[in-house]
Amino acid sequence: MILLLRERATREQIEQMLEEHKFSIKTVVDVERRVIAGGGDMHYDCEQVLLDDGSTQENIWGASFMPVNQKITYDSIVNLRPRQNRSMEILDPNIRERVAQIIIEFLGKL
């Protein structure tokens, strides 16, 4: 289940987002609007939720979050943009830090 979050997730929401992958939550973060779409099978699905909600492509970044160990991985096809990021991994350390801050704030230890 994909949820659009504008504030910290509840335990129930975390469990709903874990339904697809059990230990990992696919997330896409809008670093400007501070909004997360999380859950589902693919980052692409979360990306579409944010785009439908008014986010712009250059501000959204894909990552995965593992609640059990609080680990974030920054690999997603969503991040591959020839003019902005030439890798599936988020290369800019400032963007990585912003993504991490928002993910931890919204999904980190309850």
Image (cartoon, rainbow, N blue to C red):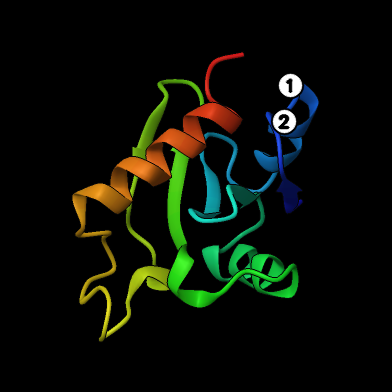
Residue 55 location, x and y as percent?
62, 69
Foreground disc of the pair 2, 1:
1
Residue type marked 2: Glu
Between residues 79 and 101, which one lies in front from this camera angle?
101
Circle 1 crowding by C-alpha within 10 Å: few under 14, some 14–19, many from 20: few
Question: Would residue 71 be found to the left or right of residue 38 on screen?
Answer: left
Q: Is mark 2 on a helix, strand or loop?
A: helix
Question: On the image, which quarter does residue 13 sit in?
Answer: top right
- In the rendered view, would you say 56 is above or below 25? below
- In the rendered view, would you say 69 is above or below 58? above
Residue type marked 1: Arg
The label number, if any, that marks residue 106 in the structure image? none
Query: Real-space Cα distance between discs 2 and 1?
Result: 6 Å
Question: On the image, which quarter does residue 100 sit in?
Answer: top left
Question: On the image, which quarter does residue 72 sit in?
Answer: top left
- In the rendered view, would you say 79 is above or below 6? below
The residue depicted at 63 percent of the width and 62 percent of the height is: 46
Between residues 40 and 35, which one lies in front from this camera angle?
35
The residue depicted at 22 percent of the width and 71 percent of the height is: 87
Q: Is mark 1 on a helix, strand or loop?
A: helix
Residue 65 location, x and y as percent?
47, 38
The residue depicted at 70 percent of the width and 71 percent of the height is: 54
Residue 26 location, x and y as percent?
54, 51
The residue depicted at 76 percent of the width and 51 percent of the height is: 1
Circles 2, 1 touching at the beta carbon (< 8 Å)? yes
Residue 74 location, x and y as percent?
33, 51
Between residues 19 and 85, which one lies in front from this camera angle?
85
Return the residue at label 1. Answer: 11
Return the residue at label 2. Answer: 15
| Residue that extends furthest to the top in the rendered view of this protein | 110
Question: Would residue 89 be found to the left or right of residue 19 on screen?
Answer: left
